[in-house]
Amino acid sequence: MATGKSTVGRVVAERLSAQFVDLDALIERAVGTSVTTLFSERGEAGFRALEAEQLDELLRTEGNYPLVVSLGGGSLVDRTRRIEKLFRAVIVTLTAAPEEIVRRAFAQEGSGAVRPLLAGGDPEERVRFLLEQRAAGYAESHGQVATDGRSIEEIAGDVLSIIERDPVPVAAGLASYSVDIGSDLAERRLSRILGNPSGTLLVTDENVGVLHGDAVRRVQRKLGVPAAEVTLSPGEEHKNLAGLERIFETAFAQGLDRQATFIGLGGGVVTDMTGFAAATWVRGVRWVGLPTTLLSMVDASVGGKTAVDFKTAKNSVGAFWQPSGVICDVARLETEGDRAFVGALSEVVKTALIGDPELFGLLEERADAIVTRDRALVTEIVERSVRVKARVVSLDERESGLRATLNLGHTIGHALESSGGYTSLTHGEAVSLGLVAALRLGEKLGETPPALTARTLRLLERLGLPFRLERSALADATRLLGHDKKRAGGSIRFVFAQGIGDVRTRQVGLEDLVQWTPDLAG
């Protein structure tokens, strides 16, 4: 309340040639009484129900688009509703200090009127309580804009900037962040995400550092704070504790404290290791992900899963640690090798199977243009993939349920990758074969329609991905299934596709899985 939503909203709407709606005013007109009276008669719960109903009706009326809506401060307190709206619109939170909110609230209402939520007791104390209570919800937005001591034009400009960027939000409470997707945007966005750290540590690898490191180094120099760099050996076989130790040694030598920020510039190996190092250095520092491969953009960069491999157990030592921001600059994909790029398309196919039938159709219709890296198409498949994963992660950050579906194709895929010493198959190629195995196992157990398996195999072939499973390779992989992170006692939570956009998990006995896996060859 009292952060200028209605005033700023009108300016934003005017600049966008959009319709402006003040939700409180809309409710008052619809019911014929004031918000204060509604609170008194129905209580806050009753008012919120009416508020939700009016907002849903407003968004259903397509003729009203484009819309700029000023919401009540408590409109999106319910998390289920907030996440649903977060992926239907751009949500911006305006902020102000508690004392400023109180000053504005009473200046607006006059001495004879009190806002319902400020009635009774010390208003500033009440505002502090509400802000603390709602902090995680307010953070789950596309961006926050401070309004203290700033002009309406300045505030509106910041809001319009967020709308223009249209980033993909990842809702994770106070650790929420956004993913920017586009071309040639890394340098200008990185400066804003970094803010004012006490120091920075760039983590990259021998290949990427030469190609794309200068832009990051320029930003580091402009900050004028201690800056360090670690260059790792490329490849999954180097994603281990030894590589992690090199990051720690550099952070230690530089004296980086909890106000420092790590920057991960590279593929999934680099971003995974940077995130895990950030999660554990002095018990947690901020980090920013700058993925440079298709695989890391559509998968590893989003969701805060950070880890290293331990012996043959892939990603077995790690932590959930969300970045402060992610920048997917698709222009950098032009330097990626063909094998890695094509392999990463398996993760896009997986994502489409999980939650985007339109993406699956796009892959089928434009396979040739995607493989040749049409910039517009690549940007679209990255954005669609990130949106699916971001929504799943927002609903289930710690993989307690829904997020497990993102592991479609990964159980046997990881085993195939590990059994080859992380060198015979790329991660993407292993996932492609893991998808084939999961679909065939789903057929065997009555979970997956044969037509879906056939359709997916045709798509994998068109994209240039491996789709033929060798019995000998599957036999070698079975001995590693017991090391899978998803194992619980004698069973593994396995993901099955029942249709495009329709997946489910089911416990499968480890002994059965070991016995059945070699028979999935073909």
Image (tube, rainbow, N blue to C red):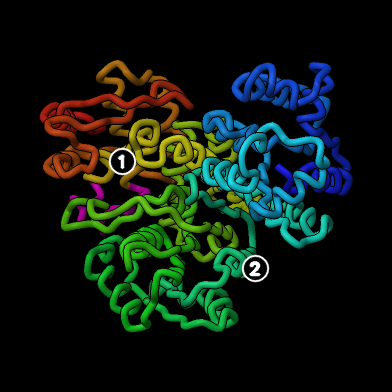
Locate the N terminus and report the quarter of the image it occupies.
top right
Question: Does the magenta run of residues contain 78?
Answer: no
2 or 1: tag closer to the N-terminus: 2
Instruction: Name the kind of residue labelled 1 in the image.
Output: His
Q: Nearer the viewer, residue 226 or 451?
A: 226
Q: Which residue is mark 2?
A: 188
Q: Is residue 40 above or below residue 90?
A: above
The quarter of the picture where residue 286 lies is: bottom left
Q: Nearer the viewer, residue 261 or 359?
A: 261
Picture residue at 61% right of the left edge, 39% below the top: 121
Q: Residue 43, percent across and down?
A: 63, 21
Q: Can residue 113 be spotted in the picture?
A: yes
Apparent side of residue 170 relative to residue 277 in the rendered image (left or right): right
Question: Does the magenta run of residues contain 417?
Answer: yes
Give the magenta-colored segment's residue range.
416-429
The circle drawn on residue 268 is: none
Q: Is residue 86 above or below residue 40?
A: below
Apparent side of residue 134 relative to residue 12 in the rendered image (left or right): left
Query: Comparing marks 2 and 1, which lies closer to the viewer?
Result: 2
Q: Which residue is mark 1?
A: 410
Q: Residue 198, percent across and down?
A: 48, 76
Q: Nearer the viewer, residue 287 or 444?
A: 287
Instruction: Name the kind of residue labelled 2 in the image.
Output: Arg
Number of numbered discs visible in the structure rendering: 2
Q: Can residue 383 be spotted in the picture?
A: no
Q: Residue 399, percent across and down?
A: 35, 38
Q: Secondary structure at mark 1?
A: helix
